Image (spheres, rainbow, N blue to C red):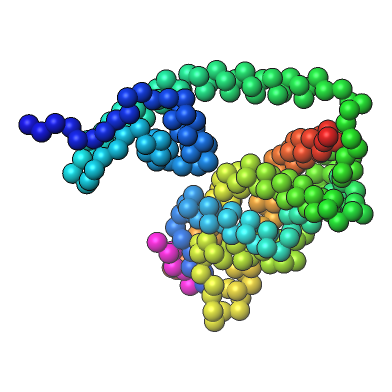
Amino acid sequence: MTLPKIEMVNVVTMEHGRQFAEAWFDGDDINEACFKTKILTWPGEDEYGQASAVEDDIVRRFSEALKDQIIETFVRVANAAIDAERLADDTELTPPRVQTVPIVTVEHAETFVEDIHRHLIDTGGFVEAFHETHIMRWPDDDKAAQEHFEEMVDEIRDRLSEETRPVIVEAFVRIASDVTLRERRRR
Amino acid sequence: MIAMSNKLDFVKIVMREHGEVFADEWEEASRSSGSLTEASTKAHIMTWPDDETDQTHFHEIEHEIARRVYDELRDSIIDTYVRIANEVLTRERRHLVKGADAVRKPQ
């Protein structure tokens, strides 16, 4: 039996920890970040497997220990940031860079939906998307069939537009309200 | 997979995959033509700013609203497209069968 040939530092220091954290936060893979600390070194390919196993063990233990800490820190920090935003004094706010309506209404959303529908017709966007689904084959040599084909496509387009209208209106009001509110609160 | 008729050929069943293609192609067409952002402009929820940097920000807001609306509605668009297309094609198929039966019946 041969002795392990990988070399390990006597003690892992805060400096190693700092190197690991910086490499990891800079976007390195967690194993790569561990490697960069040089707490393990090995002379050649033969020892790579052994070094790798030790490194994996460090990373596994690290992840287990860190998980609860991340959860606790995230909850604490995110709540603090949200509370600070909620309690912010309005007098400290700078004027918004883009002026928005105070309230996004259903009427705004209706305009949005109608314009999309008009665009779908004018630009041929609906027909283009419909053809890409290949659920119907264009009848090349039959004019009556072509007209009927177009009637069916128009029916699907109009019904789709009509039936999705309420959900689009609701989503637009909610999302646009969220975005414009955030905009008004810009510092 | 294609149902044959004397006039039109179409799939027997419109599936979710068809709906996904439709939704993504529609979004792509709307994005490249600027339909979604233009519709957002037409809603007049924001005032066009004079400053060039703010104009860029104006567009960013428009894009964010359009993207979030689409992301949230994608599933609904897919489901509705599949349902309506199946209804229309099923009705068409029934018409064709009735027509064929009428031709076969003795006068």
Q: Is residue A112 visible?
A: no
Q: Main secondary structure of the magenta part?
A: loop
Q: Quadrant of residue A180?
A: top right
Nearer to the camera, B8 or A72: A72
On screen, A112 above or below B72?
below
Q: Quadrant of residue B75?
A: top right
Nearer to the camera, A75 or A124: A75
Residue at horizontal 60 percent and vertical 46 percent from the top: B74
On screen, B93 above or below B66?
below
Q: Is residue B3 left or right of residue B37?
A: left
In magenta stretch: residue A168: no
Residue at horizontal 46 percent and vertical 22 percent from the top: A66
Q: Which residues are magenta?
A: B1-6
Q: Position of residue B87 (x, y in %)?
A: 56, 51
Q: Is residue A28 left or right of residue B27?
A: left
Q: Residue furthest bottom?
A: A141
Total numbered badges shown on the rendered structure: 0
Q: Residue furthest left?
A: A1
Which quarter of the rendered picture does the C terminus of chain A lie within?
A: top right
On screen, A32 above or below A124?
above
Residue at horizontal 46 percent and vertical 61 percent from the top: B11
Q: Is residue A131 visible?
A: yes
Which quarter of the rendered picture does the N terminus of chain A lie within?
A: top left
Q: Position of residue B37 (x, y in %)?
A: 76, 54
On screen, A177 above or below B14?
above
In magenta stretch: residue B3: yes
Residue at horizontal 70 percent and vertical 51 percent from the top: A161
Q: Position of residue A17 (x, y in %)?
A: 46, 28
Q: Position of residue B98 (x, y in %)?
A: 50, 61
